[in-house]
Every structure is written in structure tokens, then in C-alpha cells.
Amino acid sequence: MPVITVDGPKLTREQKSKLVKAITKVASEIIQLPESSIIVLIEERERDNVGVGGILLSDKD
């Protein structure tokens, strides 16, 4: 069973649902396994917990 992890910003339930469906569909087609075998994990990160170039994303706003 392939496990795909998406690490990104906070998403709405609707966004998560669309993302999981799209990733599952494409992965299934490419890997040639049934959609039921694809696991998608979503790891949400607060902007206060992500730094780029030594600066928190929340400080870039």
C-alpha cells in the first residue's frame, strides 16, 4: 500500500477532500494499483511553525 504524505498549510475540509481525491486518482493511474490501496496523509503546518530563509512565514505577511 503506497502512503503519500502532503505537508502544507491549513486547509478547509472541502480542500482536503478535493486534494485526497485528486492525489488518489492520479497515484492509482500512475502506480497501477486500485484507489482503495492508496493512503493519503495530510500534515498541516501553522505559518508560525515554518521558517524559510531564516524568517517565519508568519513574519513575512
Image (tube, rainbow, N blue to C red):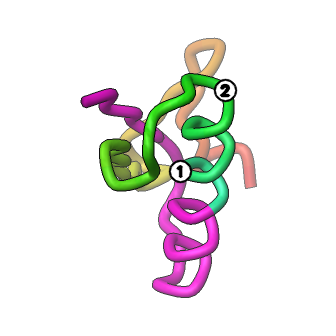
Q: Helix or strand or loop: what does disc 1 sit on?
A: helix
Q: Identify residue type, mark 2.
A: Ile
Name the residue at the top extreme.
53
Disc 1: CA contacts within 10 A as few (<14), some (14-19) or many (>=20): some
In the image, residue 18 above or below residue 51: below
- Can you tell which mark lies on residue 30? 2
Q: Residue at x 33, y 28 (%)?
A: 2
Asked whether the residues under the numbered discs 2 and 1 touch, taking CB atoms below 8 Å apart as contact, a structural biologist would say no
Q: Nearer the viewer, mark 2 or mark 1?
A: 2
Q: Helix or strand or loop: what does disc 2 sit on?
A: helix
Residues shaded magenta: 1-21
Residue 3, percent across and down? 31, 32
- Can you tell which mark lies on residue 8? none
Magenta span contains residue 57:
no
Q: Identify residue type, mark 1.
A: Thr
Please say whether residue 15 is visible from this viewpoint. Answer: yes
User: Which residue is identified by label 1?
Assistant: 24
Q: Residue 61 vs residue 4: left or right?
A: right
How far is the residue under mark 2 from the one under mark 1?
A: 10 Å
